[in-house]
Amino acid sequence: MRRAFVVATAVAVAIVGASIGAAAPVARSVVLVTHDSFAISKSTKAAFETQSGLKLRILQNGDAGAALNRALLTAGRPEGDVFFGVDNNLLSRALGGKLFDAYTPAALTQVERAYDLDLSHHLVPIDHGAICLVYDRAWFAAHKLRPPYTFEDLLRPGYAKLTVVENPATSTPGLAFMLATIAHFGSGKAPWTYWSRIKRDVLVTNGWDEAYNAQFSGSSSHKGKRPIVVSYSSDPAAEVYFAGKPRTQAPVAVVRNTCFGQVELAGILRGAKNPDGARKLVDFLLSQRFQAGIPLTMFVYPVRGRTPLPAVFMRFSPPMSSPLTLSPATIGANRDAWISEWTDTVLR
């Protein structure tokens, strides 16, 4: 879903052997299959291992889309026990692949109902966030140009050649932003008319890392030249947190009218070798301990109600109250056709 500033180390799955003629060994580990942006602190990981008596092994398989595609190829013969990283934009694809066994953790009653997207509970919500246009405050101040406020601002002459976006076919932020334009303009021709008008003025990258860290002028790398990027609503808090010194204002800001809501979910993989351990892990992902650590490890927001947010989030990146949304059913029925339409409109 999101790039992680503190990245958990991917580890291989351990294979536990059994003596000939002996009973099947008790599983000593549980394997979480996920994307490269998943992160967990050492202390939180240790807390799970102490509580469960299991070793937590983390297998990271690229970005969210790539990790899901790999899981679909091994449906019923999974590489691990739990998968984390399906979002609302890929939910129908994951459920259609019959990847997961249903499980309703007790802590789900503590989750805000709006995030409980799969009522069969083959997948349960773990975190949420928003994808938005983000801009470089210093650039706009230096050029004495008003920062963007709406999607339509990108059509103005003064904003030409300022924006970098990700390809929705290869990037989950890119997919979310494409969906944001559909939610804003409607599902007819209007979104594609909009994209046809801005396509010569936006730079398209294959993924978030290139867009934010290489092409965006407001990132801490300071490598890019474009002052507007498709990224995350939590970027202001992240930039302040990693600046390592007090700041009264974040160097980047969010165009709140362009934000599209994103929910990330986890589920027990069908055919898991350690289903009991998988249930314990899903329970832990919804525990107060794990949920409280989400903001400063993955820089998204917990779904469990009444989970306190760090001060840097409350000051610089409070949660979006009403981001743009489309139902998972609508996305599932149209996603591939919309990506094809975007590709034909923007890249050809």
Image: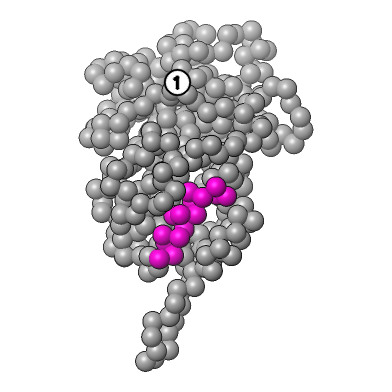
Q: Which residues are magenta?
A: 276-290
Residue at image coords 40%, 52%: 105
Query: Which amino acid type is marked by label 1?
Result: Thr
Residue 48 lies in the magenta stretch: no
| Relative image position of residue 279 (x, y in whole percent) | 41, 59
Residue 234: x percent and y percent?
56, 31
Q: Position of residue 290 (x, y in %)?
A: 55, 49
Crowd tier of the residue under label 1, counting other residues whose Cα lies within 10 Å: few below 14, some 14–19, many 20 or above: many
Q: Nearer the viewer, residue 79 or 199?
A: 79
In this rendering, does residue 43 appear at all? yes
Number of numbered discs: 1
Badge 1 is on which residue?
A: 258
Residue at 52% over, 68% down: 54
Residue sitting at 31 percent across and 51 percent down? 122
Position above or below: 34 against 187: below
Q: How is the image coloured?
A: one colour
Where is 274 relative to 120, above or below? below
Main SS of the magenta part reads helix
Horizontal side, residue 298 vs residue 86: left or right = right
Q: Nearer the viewer, residue 165 or 258?
A: 258
Classify mark 1: helix, strand or loop.
strand
Above or below, 126 against 82 in this view is: above
Q: Residue furthest right?
A: 245
Vertical comparison of 118 with 130: above or below: below
Quarter of the image holding residue 73? bottom left
